Image (cartoon, helix red, strand yellow):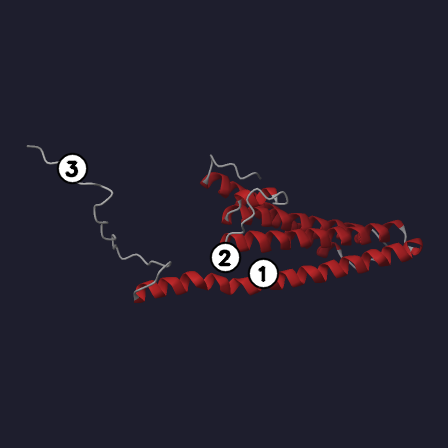
Amino acid sequence: MSVPPPDVATSPPSPPDDKGGMNVSHPRTPAGMIGWSIFASRWVQAPLYIGLIAAQIIYVVKFWKELVHLVVDFSSFDENAIMLTVLGLVDVVMIANLLIMVIIGGYETFVSRIRMDNHPDQPEWLSHVNANVLKVKLAMAIVGISSIHLLKTFIEYGTHESELTSTEVMWQTIIHMTFVLSAIGLAYIDRYLSPTKDDGL
């Protein structure tokens, strides 16, 4: 006579498979407590991102100060002075964008998930952010900021009041090209490591 199979629903649960891992959800052993402490240490970075938010507020104040100065005294500015002031405003905006990428992307990647799924205001790049994508985007932002500074240098160098020397302009150009090559290298490495992944860059 055949024996009926045991009821799966009433069978006792199998013992947990202890392979030496660290259960950070419910630490009950010294190893688990160590793992939980290491995992929780990521929150040490949270005050750093809050500090960057404060730095962004300072840049907002600087932006409006420069804008008010441009609006009030624009009649006494020549074309080059207006262009340099506008480039300074663009520079502040690009640095603020860089701060946003570091704050949101860094927090999302290294501290904790930001629950913004299906939120209408969610940035497009945040849906596929990771450490590699963040590095490439930061490198591209730095290249943009360096381009603004280099353009300001060229404009100032063309004025009679400029104190810049050709050597200083040359070194700024070399530094800018170093940033460009670094960004290209990071993008190539990211594509090489994940050739089938679309990071939206």
Residue at 51%, 52% (x, y): give it: 113
| Amino acid type for the residue under numbered disc 2 | Val
Residues at circles 3 and 2 in contact by the CB criterion of under 8 Å: no
The answer, for residue 149, to whether it is visible in the render is: no
The residue that disc 3 covers is: 5
The answer to whether residue 10 is left or right of residue 63 is left
Viewer-closest of 154 and 7: 7
Label 2, secondary structure: give it.
helix
At a point 30% along the width and 65% down the height, the residue shown is 29
Dot 3: within a 10 Å radius of its alpha carbon, few (fewer than 14), some, or many (20 or more) residues?
A: few
Q: Is residue 161 left or right of residue 189?
A: right
User: Mark 1 or 3, which is nearer the eye?
Assistant: 3
Task: Please name whichever residue, 171 or 186, is drawn nearer the observer in this view of the structure.
Answer: 186
Q: Residue at x 85, y 57 (%)?
A: 68
10 to the left or right of 166: left
Marker count (numbered): 3
